[in-house]
């Protein structure tokens, strides 16, 4: 059977991370699964977890009473779901709806924040990874905003 | 070169603003249908209105079925949109350079298309599927604005069902009923199955999208000589005469539309043409 440690190390988010850090993190991790149609979290809920997606598809949605749910982005194998655990006030900003059966590793943000405070090297590794992820997401969002396929956006 | 009259055999709507014409040389025109290479285009003349450069989007192995996919954006393309079965349209061509299918032999191919940019790349897909053993992994990454804006949706679905082709489709926005991917097409690049050190990339779409696609590919340390893009900026004569699409020593119509990224890098930052 695959150990949680191996699964963590194999996820692109942790690629290249030293084993001693993975060992520290494994206590904050658990295996989770969700069926299609389930909500992993909803906007405004307290954000204590984030997810490394191993399989499946999750839609990040914003809901407006006038427009109904709007899909902003879908996340798939290799992606990371949820940043709100990192940034106060630690509340989710969007709904995460499962489009296809999804398996993921849930990481406990409170646990991670505590370990990162205790071990700043670990915290730095984490921040490097998250800042890359956020920069990429920002670039992609800008490209999406440009509406490049319209002649007169 | 004078336009050869062609008869519209079939017309069908692809999306709200894009349609496909199937044409054949008009009766009495004894000449054989022109063969073409993937990436090449024709000048389509809507009589009394004007001419537009339109890529050939059909199967290069079946040149008797001349297929063009057109987005109605201005006077000429809107006039072409009014054509019905049996009507006549003038054709000059085929013109232009081709996708590097010879150079890609034995290598992986990553095709990245955005919006109407899938039209000039569809002949590549046809060719590759008919000669599948000549190529390594083949990946098609396609982006469009919304699910309703996807070209060739049925074909995309068929291609996705194959074991020898990876097809990934992303839209910028979608209702909650869409079960596919939402996001930019370039997100697929780092996870698609191709070997960047060996692959050839063929990219066509809005220029901003092409720039981001090239960046995504270069991040994987793919050589820029292995990246090809099709520059479909506006042109008039198609034979390097009028200078409308001239850039330095190059004419998009004559030397392009398919260029190696290496040779056209500077062009992508020129705003004038
Ligand atoms: C080599 C080549 C291949 C092409 N292949 C296709 C194809 O397969 N299908 C297709 O639908 N179109 C294709 N095009 C684009 C097509 O030629 C133009 O959209 C067409 O000239 C528009 O003519 P028009 O008279 O209808 O509109 P115009 O009145 O000329 O233009 C209407 C609007 O579209 C904009 N526009 C015109 N041409 C372009 C362009 N090339 N890129 C971005 N914006 C433009 C204009 O700025 C204007 O805002 C290709 C262009 C080239 C150079």
Image: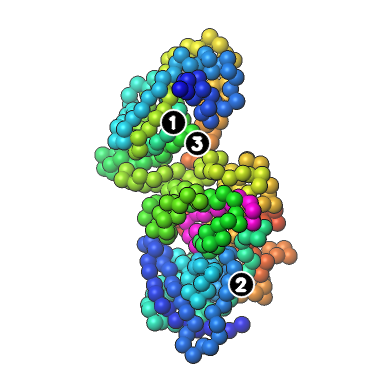
1 and 3 marks on the same chain: yes
- Binning the other alpha carbons within 10 Å of mark 2 as few (below 14), some (14 to 19) or many (20 upward) gives many
Check the residue under mark 1 and report the chain it is in: A
* B22 over B224 or under it: above or below: below
Q: Is B115 colored magenta in this rendering? A: yes
Residue sitting at x 45%, y 55%: B159
Work out how far the residue at label 2 is from the one at label 1, CA to CA, in angstroms.
Answer: 47 Å
Quick one: which residue is furthest to the top in this view?
A118
Q: Which chain carries label 3?
A: A
Q: In this view, does B98 lie to the left or right of B61?
A: right
Does the numbered disc 2 mark a residue whose Cβ is under 8 Å from ligand 1?
Answer: yes
Please tell me the numbered disc located at residue A137.
3
Q: In which quarter of the image is the C terminus of chain B?
A: bottom right
Q: Is residue B50 something that shows in the picture?
A: no
Q: Mark 1 points at which residue?
A: A53
Magenta residues?
A: B104-121
Q: B39 left or right of B11?
A: right
Which quarter of the figure has residue A88?
A: top left
Secondary structure under the numbered disc 3 in the rendered image: helix
Residue at horizontal 63 percent and vertical 51 percent from the top: B107
In the image, residue B183 above or below residue B34: above
The residue at label 1 has a CB less than 8 Å from ligand 1: no
Question: Residue B112 location, x and y as percent?
Answer: 54, 52
Q: Give residue B95's mark.
A: 2
Q: Residue at x 41, y 78 (%)?
A: B9
Q: Label 2: chain?
A: B
Q: Do labels 2 and 1 share a chain?
A: no
Answer with the quarter of the image where residue A74 lies. Answer: top left
Q: Earlier in the sequence, mark 1 or mark 3?
A: 1
């Amino acid at each position: 059977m695959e150990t949680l440690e191996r699964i963590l190390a194999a996820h692109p988010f942790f690629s290249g991370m030293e084993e001693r850090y993975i060992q520290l993190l494994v206590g904050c991790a658990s295996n989770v699964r969700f069926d299609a149609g389930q909500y992993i979290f909803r906007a405004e809920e307290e954000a204590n977890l984030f997810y490394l997606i191993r399989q499946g598809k999750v839609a990040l949605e914003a809901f407006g009473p006038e427009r109904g749910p709007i899909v902003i982005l879908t996340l798939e194998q290799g992606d990371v779901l949820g940043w709100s655990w990192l940034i106060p006030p630690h509340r989710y900003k969007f709904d995460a709806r499962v489009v296809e059966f999804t398996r993921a590793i849930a990481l406990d943000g409170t646990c991670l924040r505590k370990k990162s405070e205790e071990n700043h090297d670990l915290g730095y590794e984490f921040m490097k990874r998250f800042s890359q992820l956020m920069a990429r997401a920002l670039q992609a969002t800008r490209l999406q905003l440009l509406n490049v396929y319209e002649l007169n956006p | 070169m004078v336009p050869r009259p062609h008869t519209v055999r079939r017309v069908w709507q692809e999306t709200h603003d894009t349609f496909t014409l199937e044409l054949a040389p008009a009766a009495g025109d004894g000449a054989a249908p022109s063969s073409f290479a993937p990436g090449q285009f024709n000048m389509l003349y809507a009589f009394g209105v004007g001419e537009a450069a339109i890529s050939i989007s059909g199967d290069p192995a079946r040149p008797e079925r001349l297929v063009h996919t057109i987005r109605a954006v201005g006077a000429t393309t809107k006039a072409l949109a009014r054509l019905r079965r049996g009507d006549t349209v003038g054709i000059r061509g085929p013109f232009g350079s081709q996708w590097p299918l010879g150079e890609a032999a034995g290598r992986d191919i990553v095709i990245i298309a955005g919006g109407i940019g899938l039209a000039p790349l569809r002949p590549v897909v046809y060719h590759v599927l008919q000669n599948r053993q000549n190529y390594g992994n083949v990946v098609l990454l396609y982006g469009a604005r919304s699910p309703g804006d996807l070209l060739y949706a049925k074909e995309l679905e068929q291609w996705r069902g194959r074991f020898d082709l990876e097809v990934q489709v992303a839209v910028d926005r979608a209702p909650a009923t869409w079960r596919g991917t939402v996001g930019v097409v370039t997100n697929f690049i780092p996870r698609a199955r191709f070997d960047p050190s060996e692959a050839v990339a063929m990219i066509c779409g809005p220029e901003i999208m092409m720039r981001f696609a090239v960046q995504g590919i270069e991040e994987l340390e793919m050589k820029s000589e292995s990246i090809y893009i099709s520059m479909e900026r506006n042109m008039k004569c198609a034979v390097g005469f009028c200078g409308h699409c001239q850039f330095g020593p190059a004419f998009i119509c004559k030397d392009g539309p398919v260029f190696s990224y290496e040779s056209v890098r500077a062009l992508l930052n020129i705003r004038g043409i």
